[in-house]
Image (cartoon, grey):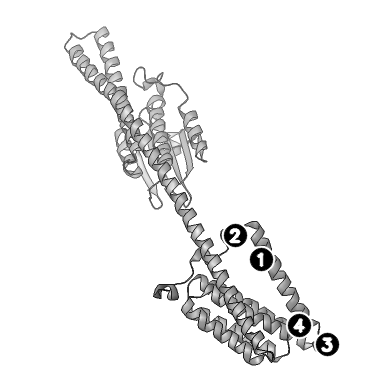
């Protein structure tokens, strides 16, 4: 046996009840109940116990139970000397029970001390503690030495068998945890590979198509500007410029989606500042910023995009305030606007663009993550008296 085997503690999995089947749990509870019943019967059935003796016996049993619980906790933390000290205290309780005439209780205490010492302590400490325990038991007992030797061997072997069983169970628990971690890593790797494939397809098809559209629209704009001014020419130019703007925004959103698929999104606060700078919005971040899940981060980005697009459609020129709050278990986004010139002042064709289901889609996306999205009239930033009521969008998603 190597030196490590003598000084090594049983694993944490072996020292806990993890991995026990229901049958074994019920069996262990039944054994403890039987032992407790035997202790109580042997303690209080004697005619010599009464009055203050009952109180003293109950106090001793309570102290022993507390020391046993403390021993369980200290061995779970691998604290050697506190564990040995508590085992000595338990042995002292056994000796006190023997001197008080509670022979059955003392015998149970001696055996339990020896078994739990062998089961939960490093072997270098467990063997001396067990030998001391059983040696004390042999000194105070007045029986056959053969019976004492057989009892000692049986208790030592029983404690060591329980130790090996617990170690085997702990090893099985560790292997099971490793297998689960490997399966999770394999699933994540497969998901990342699939997301990378989707990102490549989107880049090769949609991003290239939008880039080509931008080139053609820019060429059309330059060509139209060379024509003589006139109502027809100005109208066509306005539509081409609007289409170019939409294509540029679509390309930017496509790049954001590609970044999300590849897992290299810019920090959320930085993204909000960049997006708000295009519309002159105010951005405030409250709480301690931290990385969010990809789904939550993407939902926040989409809601901000939708809210700012709605402002451009329905209240161009409005003041917009974006507040991102990091909570303990969630993140909250609040987008409020006030003022504005009304939808009639929006660029031609912008008000009618879109399907009208943007906020509904965002609400469904938030609910899929276990969050909520509320949208409706509300006070905008600044003084509501001078600017009137605006519109607010509030998103909350688990972080």
Nearer the camera: disc 2 or disc 3: 2
The crowding category of the residue bearing disc 2, from other C-alpha atoms within 10 Å (few below 14, some 14 to 19, many at least 20), is few
Nearer the camera: disc 2 or disc 4: 2
The crowding category of the residue bearing disc 3, from other C-alpha atoms within 10 Å (few below 14, some 14 to 19, many at least 20), is few
350 in relation to 191, above or below: above
Q: What residue is drawn where x is 68% and y is 65%?
A: 29
Residue underneath mark 1? 28
What is the C-alpha distance between the residues marked 4 and 3? Answer: 10 Å
- Mark 4 vs 1, N-terminal side: 1
Residue underneath mark 2? 20
Q: What residue is drawn where x is 37% and y is 20%?
A: 350
Residue underneath mark 3? 47
Tell me the quadrant of the picture where the N terminus can be found.
Answer: bottom left
- Mark 2 vs 1, N-terminal side: 2
User: Which residue extends farthest front?
Assistant: 146
Residue 152, percent across and down? 61, 82
What is the C-alpha distance between the residues marked 4 and 1? Answer: 22 Å
């Amino acid at each position: 046996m190597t030196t490590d085997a003598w000084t090594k503690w049983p694993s944490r999995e072996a020292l806990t009840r993890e991995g026990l089947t229901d049958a074994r749990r019920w069996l262990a509870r039944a054994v403890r109940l039987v032992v407790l019943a035997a202790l109580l019967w042997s303690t209080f059935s004697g005619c010599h116990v009464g009055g203050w003796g009952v109180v003293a016996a109950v106090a001793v049993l309570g102290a022993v139970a507390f020391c046993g619980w403390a021993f369980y906790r200290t061995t779970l933390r691998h604290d050697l000397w506190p564990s040995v000290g508590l085992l000595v205290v338990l042995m002292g309780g056994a000796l006190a029970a023997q001197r008080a005439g509670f022979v059955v209780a003392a015998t149970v205490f001696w055996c339990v001390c020896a078994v739990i010492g062998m089961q939960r302590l490093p072997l270098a400490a467990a063997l001396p503690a067990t030998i001391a325990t059983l040696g004390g038991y042999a000194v105070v007992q007045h029986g056959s030495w053969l019976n004492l030797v057989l009892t000692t061997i049986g208790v030592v072997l029983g404690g060591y068998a329980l130790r090996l069983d617990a170690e085997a169970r702990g090893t099985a628990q560790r292997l099971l945890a490793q297998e689960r971690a490997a399966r999770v890593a394999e699933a994540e790797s497969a998901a990342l590979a699939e997301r990378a494939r989707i990102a490549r397809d989107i880049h090769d098809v949609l991003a290239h198509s939008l880039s080509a559209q931008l080139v053609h629209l820019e060429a059309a704009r330059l060509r139209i500007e060379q024509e003589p001014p006139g109502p027809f020419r100005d109208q066509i130019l306005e539509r081409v410029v609007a289409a170019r703007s939409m294509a540029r925004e679509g390309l930017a959103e496509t790049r954001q989606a590609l970044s999300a698929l590849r897992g290299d999104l810019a920090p959320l606060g930085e993204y909000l500042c960049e997006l708000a700078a295009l519309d002159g919005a105010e951005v405030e971040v409250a709480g301690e910023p931290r990385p969010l899940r990809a789904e939550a981060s993407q939902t926040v980005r989409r809601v901000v995009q939708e809210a700012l697009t709605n402002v451009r459609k329905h209240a161009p020129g409005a003041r917009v305030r974006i507040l991102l709050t990091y909570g303990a278990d969630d993140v909250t986004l609040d987008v409020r606007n006030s003022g504005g010139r009304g939808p009639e002042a929006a660029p031609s064709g912008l008000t009618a663009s879109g399907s009208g289901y943007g906020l509904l889609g965002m609400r469904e996306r938030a609910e899929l993550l276990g969050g909520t999205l509320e949208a409706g009239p509300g006070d905008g930033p600044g003084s509501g008296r001078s600017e009137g009521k605006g519109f607010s969008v509030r998103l909350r998603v688990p972080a």
